[in-house]
């Protein structure tokens, strides 16, 4: 398979790049700028596979530059940075990394939820600043998980793993998807506003992309209400961030915990000025254990595909037909 040329950004994790270089001829793309563009123009005619993470947007325009492209292996379960619909229409397979990260992301989500509701980062900061001895105990929190209803927007693989953990916390769970899930008995809401109205805490683990773009908007925050908490572990593009900032500033909702943002790694400065907000730098799947499993799936998808055995985890828009 050494004659097969695979393109990847130079920032791809070494665990992945090293294995790809063992099997294929690996072309490492320089950082964005004129050098990257020159390299793409020079290499594009021969590239048959791309290994990519969110840091290289594979729009239709980008994919169209590679006439011999057969497969895009995405590092991540969310593949909103790849135009999979266009790929499907042009006979290109897209793969992602489902399941191997589900439990890690669900664990992180529960951590973020508890941090936000019980103000754990703020109280730790209180101790570090010497306030415990100076000013006394950290103030009691108004927020709690006790007696709360939690709504999950995007009850798929990760959403269900979050719900399973939440069951052990003794809270009520409800959800919104485009369609009712067959394998759960949690109350289903056919609208996001309806779900937000019915719960105290809204957790989004919905995918990004045009279908969810800014769906979590001012109406949703109004429905969640002044005691409400919003947690996002899905994608930042699903949230109207200015509306969220306003809702937090004027008390439309009480608190938020965010692992994802619309223009990562940029985080709107207003979030940093708000007291009842917990901010994480997209660390949902970020352990060596889980990132290695994801990386291995990227490598295995490419190796399997070019060995003629088909992709392991093709996305819905590009089903594998032998
Ligand atoms: P999944 O199994 O495909 O679940 C996605 C769920 O969202 C499905 O239940 C789907 O149900 C629902 N959904 C999709 N589009 C919707 C829409 N327009 N309106 C309402 N519901 C919609 O995916 P997953 O493995 O759980 O991953 C979910 C997302 O988590 C990923 O796409 C990624 O963006 C994010 N993620 C974040 C991190 C992190 O580090 N923060 C890590 C991993 C994943 P219906 O089809 O019935 O609508
Ligand atoms: C990754 C993620 O950190 O899988 C996803 O969709 O958001 C995360 O697990 C990200 O995709 C790596 O770029």
Image: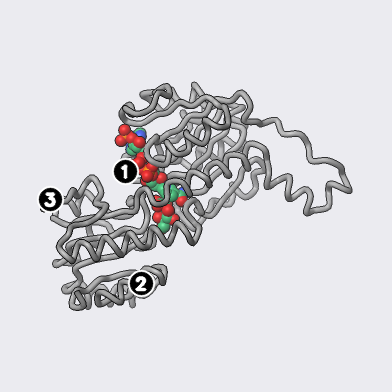
57 horizontally vs 239: left or right:
left
Looking at the rendered structure, the secondary structure element under dot 1 is loop
**Which of the 4 image quadrants contains residue 16?**
bottom left
Q: Quadrant of ligand 1?
A: top left
Q: Give SS at disc 3.
A: loop
Q: Is residue 218 above or below residue 197?
A: below
Between the residue at mark 1 and the residue at mark 3, the CA separation in whole angstroms equals 26 Å
Name the N-terminal-most of marks 1 and 2: 2
248 left or right of 4 in image: right
Badge 2: few (under 14), some or many (20 or more) residues near its Cα, within 10 Å? many
Q: Secondary structure at mark 2?
A: helix
Q: Residue at x 61, y 36 (%)?
A: 255
Q: Position of residue 43 (x, y in %)?
A: 22, 76
Whichever of callouts 2 and 3 sits on the residue coming sooner in the sequence is: 2
Residue drawn at (39%, 36%), measured in percent from left and top? 154
Residue that lies at the very extreme toward the right in this rendered image? 134
Q: Position of residue 232 (x, y in %)?
A: 49, 42
Q: Which mark is residue 321?
A: 3
Q: Label 2, on which residue?
A: 17
Residue 160 showing in the rendered view = yes
Judge whether residue 207 can be spotted in this image: no
Q: Nearer the viewer, mark 1 or mark 2?
A: 2
Q: Nearer the viewer, mark 1 or mark 3?
A: 3
> At 47% from the left edge and 59% from the top edge, which residue is drawn?
289
Quadrant position of residue 115? top right
Q: Which residue is mark 1?
A: 210
Q: Given contact means CB atoms under 8 Å apart, are the residues at marks 1 and 2 in contact?
A: no
């Amino acid at each position: 398979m050494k004659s097969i040329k695979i393109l990847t950004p130079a920032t791809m994790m070494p665990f992945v790049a090293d294995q790809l270089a063992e099997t294929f001829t690996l072309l490492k793309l320089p950082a964005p700028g004129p050098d990257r563009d020159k390299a793409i123009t020079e290499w594009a005619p021969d590239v048959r596979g791309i290994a990519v993470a969110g840091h290289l947007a594979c729009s239709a325009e980008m994919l169209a530059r590679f006439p011999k492209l057969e497969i895009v292996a995405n590092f991540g379960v969310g593949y909103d940075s790849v135009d999979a619909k266009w790929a499907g229409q042009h006979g290109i397979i897209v793969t992602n990394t489902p399941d191997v990260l589900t439990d890690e992301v669900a664990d992180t989500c529960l951590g973020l939820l508890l941090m936000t509701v019980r103000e754990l980062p703020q109280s730790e900061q209180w101790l570090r600043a010497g306030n415990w001895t100076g000013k006394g105990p950290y103030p009691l929190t108004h927020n709690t998980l006790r007696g709360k209803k939690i709504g999950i927007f995007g009850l798929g693989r990760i959403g269900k793993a979050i719900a399973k953990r939440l069951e052990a916390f003794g809270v009520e769970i409800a959800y919104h998807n485009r369609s009712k899930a067959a394998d759960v008995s949690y109350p289903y809401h056919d609208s996001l506003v309806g779900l937000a109205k019915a719960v105290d805490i809204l957790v989004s683990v919905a995918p990004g992309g045009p279908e969810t773009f800014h769906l979590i908007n001012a109406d949703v925050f109004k429905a969640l209400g002044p005691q409400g908490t919003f947690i996002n572990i899905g994608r930042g593009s699903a949230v109207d961030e200015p509306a969220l900032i306003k809702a937090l500033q004027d008390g439309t909702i009480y608190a938020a915990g965010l692992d994802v943002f619309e223009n990562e790694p940029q985080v709107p400065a207003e979030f940093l000025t708000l007291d009842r907000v917990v901010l994480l730098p997209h660390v949902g799947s970020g352990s060596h254990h889980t990132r290695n499993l994801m990386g291995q799936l990227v490598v295995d998808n490419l190796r399997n595909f070019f060995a003629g055995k088909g992709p392991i985890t093709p996305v819905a828009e590009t089903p594998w037909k032998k």
